[in-house]
């Protein structure tokens, strides 16, 4: 499994690096360095998670437990920074997402978990680099000022392409894989925007500095939580 995915991720990161180099032509040196750091750390995170997926259960479940535990701590710190009355519905949503994530993550085959992760990671990564290069129209300026419509379209296109290339992980046809890839990218966007809403209310840029160049665990994995909650549940419901 891992060899087949790496044959997709390595060219994907190479393309992402090329697009970032184009975007950095008009960036300041400090901004360019920060972007390269983020890409390098992202590369290692992606392949670490894929390595866990290749190891199978119970490692996937334990990984999700660790991510959710760190995310809960980060969310608590952010929630405390919100002016009173603080929205308790944040915790209702998070607990529902956490329960769904653990259930789907433990029930899906590790190959399906790897598929959802690599698709959301692809959508995240290409949304950012394409947005930095070609993005002009803000997508949700009040929630996430850096997101653009052009970046989202680039991310969804890349997600669909990677979904087709890794469709054997789902034993799906190319058309089905592309559709699942786009749906997964949109589900990941929903998770991202929900996490961004809390950050805006708390007045913070990142949940923490736990992951260099990435922010916190919730910054990095909010899209995966959204994808596991929505797409993962749909995949479990299918025959």
Image: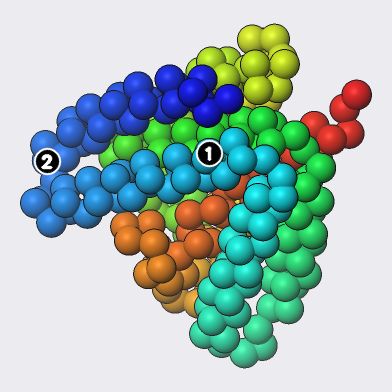
Q: Residue at x 63, y 69 (%)?
A: 69
Task: Report the residue at 69% width, 78% height from top.
Answer: 87
**In the image, which disc is placed on residue 229?**
none
Residue at image location 69% in from the left, 36% down from the top: 110
Near-viewer residue (63 or 131)? 63
Q: State the image quarter where residue 20 is shown.
A: top left
Report helix, strand or loop for mark 2. helix
The answer to whether residue 139 shows anywhere in this view is no
Mark closer to the observer (1, 2)? 1
| Foreground of the two, 160 or 37 | 37
Circles 1 and 2: CB atoms closer than 8 Å: no
- Asked if residue 84 is positioned above or below residue 108 in the image, the reply reads below
Image-based side of 32 in relation to 136, left or right:
left
- Identify the image quadrant of the N terminus: top right
Q: Secondary structure at mark 1?
A: helix
Query: x and y percent of residue 118 in the render?
Result: 53, 34
Q: Looking at the image, which residue is at 16% across and 48% down?
A: 32
Residue with the mark numbered 1: 50
Q: Give the mark nearest the N terminus, 1 or 2.
A: 2
Closer-to-camera residue (53/120): 53
Vertical placement of residue 177 versus 206, above or below: above
């Amino acid at each position: 499994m891992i060899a087949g995915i790496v044959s997709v991720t390595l060219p994907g990161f190479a393309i992402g690096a090329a697009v970032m180099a184009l975007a950095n032509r008009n960036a300041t040196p400090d901004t360019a360095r920060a972007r390269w750091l983020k890409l390098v750390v992202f590369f290692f995170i992606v392949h670490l998670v894929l390595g866990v997926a290749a190891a199978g259960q119970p490692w996937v479940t334990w990984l999700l437990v660790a991510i959710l535990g760190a995310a809960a701590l980060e969310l608590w710190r952010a929630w405390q920074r919100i002016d009173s009355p603080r929205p308790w519905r944040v915790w209702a949503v998070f607990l529902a997402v956490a329960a769904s994530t653990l259930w789907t993550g433990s029930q899906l085959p590790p190959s399906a978990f790897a598929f959802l992760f690599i698709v959301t990671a692809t959508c995240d990564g290409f949304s950012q680099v394409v947005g930095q290069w070609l993005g002009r129209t803000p997508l949700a300026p009040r929630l996430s000022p850096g997101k653009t419509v052009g970046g989202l379209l680039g991310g969804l296109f890349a997600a669909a392409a990677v979904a087709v290339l890794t469709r054997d992980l789902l034993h799906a046809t190319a058309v089905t894989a592309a559709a699942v890839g786009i749906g997964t990218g949109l589900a990941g966007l929903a998770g991202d925007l929900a996490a961004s809403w809390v950050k805006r209310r708390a007045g913070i840029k990142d949940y923490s500095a736990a992951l260099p160049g990435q922010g916190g665990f919730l910054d990095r994995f909010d899209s995966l939580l959204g994808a596991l909650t929505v797409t993962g549940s749909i995949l479990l419901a299918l025959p």
